[in-house]
Amino acid sequence: MSYSTLNHKSRCCLNKKEIYFIFFAIIAIFLFNAMPISVLSPILIILIGLAIGIAIIYIFAYGDASYLLNIFLIGFSLRIFVSFLCYIISFLIPNWTPGFLFSNDGWLYSDQGWQICKFAERGIKISAEQVLNNPNLKIQSGNITSYDYFASHVYSITGYSPLSLLFISSLAGSIAALFVYLIARELFSKRVARLSAIFAFFWPSFIMWSTQNLKEPMIAMFILIFLWTIFYIHRHFAYVFLALSIVSILVLLKIGQPFLIMIAAAFFFSGLFLFSNHLFKNKLVAGLVIVIALIIGIAFFKNAILSLFHLNIQNYKTIFEFIDYSRDVRAYGRLQFLKGFDISTLPRVLSFLPFGLFYAFFAPFPWQLGSAAQIMAVPETIVFYLLLPYTVIGIAFGYKRRFNQSLLLLSVITAVMLLLALLDSNSGTLFRHRSVVFYLLFIFTAIGISLKSNKRFFIRRC
């Protein structure tokens, strides 16, 4: 037999690795076909999430891919594990009420979404108003939101699979952390980006909210994507990034409208401040222009702004009465604070703001133990207090040395915290809602830590 014949035969034979790969591929295809979609969908979400995360890292952070990939895999896996653990405790342990660990909003989104999905399967498509008035639907939360409809769309694909919703939330939290890294690196340095990513991936409450089927991780993800596209387009314009920013706005309009309103305000006043500062060469005068613009906006364009976001305050004499009412209805439970404070006029709002902002940043306090979640939050709260000096140093550095880069982030943080200070009168829900902008706040914490640990290197790189 000639050498060429032997060589041809050897090429036709499969080696052991190839045989094993084909064998396991066949087994995997068989198992995937045999699995019900409600079991298969969480697995697919994990695989899709890994693909998205790895693609983001290697396309936009290739120079630091090894570091970022490691913490992404650890952070995402940790969220998936906690989500699965919550699912087991909530649904698989006999005689335990479903939704035990996420008995409030997370469970209600799932339950109401499933009810809407079952109606849709029978060809009955109903609006939020019809859902609330339908005696066949048990609406425990008292209202229907776009997130309930999001859950119903997921269930229309996966069947009844609460684990899929938990894994989607985990993915959103992990992607949000990746964009914290990208924003920090775009504006400051790799060192700041690395520290910011550590906070974003492993801050305990970020992990907790990312595993409970809540809106906040998704809202944070789209806010961070939107901000990153704005910063990135400045240097690398492409229509795909513009489209991504528009998609982020549309999603926020559906599931995070109050946050979008404050982000729009932050954009407007940041631009006005930069223009005024450039024109008058004085930050104090620029700040005065902002105050005047705010007064004019409230006086003349209030109704147009409210109608744009479908907010109806016809039953109230002023917008401040509307804010006062909205805050009062949220003051419930053992963790309510400053419930009796009247903020129905502008002077009363101004007198309330210092107290409201103090609570917005620092509540829940270590002695407020209204629930198991609050007890779990005590160590995190203490660590946050210890990190506060670094955060202040980072903000001061951003204001003095990197003003143009920091202004929009600081404006968004300030605008959203003002909103929470005025409207959130329960420190439990406040603790959850503020996580959306604490992703940004921890960038300045990372700046402060970088300055203290290696000041010369950091300033030279910045």
Image (spheres, rainbow, N blue to C red):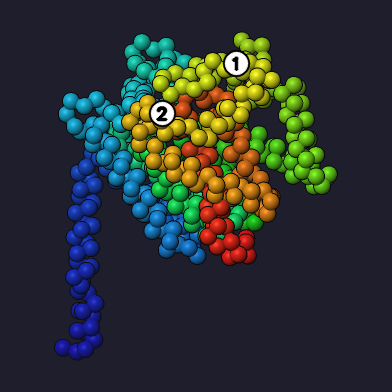
Q: Residue furthest right?
A: 280
- In x, y percent, where is residue 208? 37, 39
Residue type beneath disc 1 = Asp
Q: Residue 365 lies in what quarter of the image? A: top left
Examine the rendering and report whether any part of residue 127 can be seen.
no
Q: Secondary structure at mark 2?
A: loop
Residue 413 numbered tag: none
What residue is rendered at 51% in x and 25% in y? 424
- In x, y percent, where is residue 185? 56, 56
Determine whether, in the image, residue 164 is placed left or right of residue 455. left
Residue type beneath disc 2 = Gln
Determine whether, in the image, residue 462 is placed left or right of residue 4. right
Quick one: 91 or 112, which is closer to the camera?
A: 91
Determine whether, in the image, residue 134 is placed left or right of residue 315. left
The residue identified by callout 2 is 368
Q: Residues within 10 Å of mark 1 (few under 14, many from 20)?
A: some
> Mark 1, mark 2: which one is toward the viewer?
2
Give the quarter of the figure containing the N terminus: bottom left
Residue 342 numbered tag: 1
Mark 1 vs mark 2, CA separation in Å = 23 Å
What residue is rendered at 80% in x and 45% in y? 282
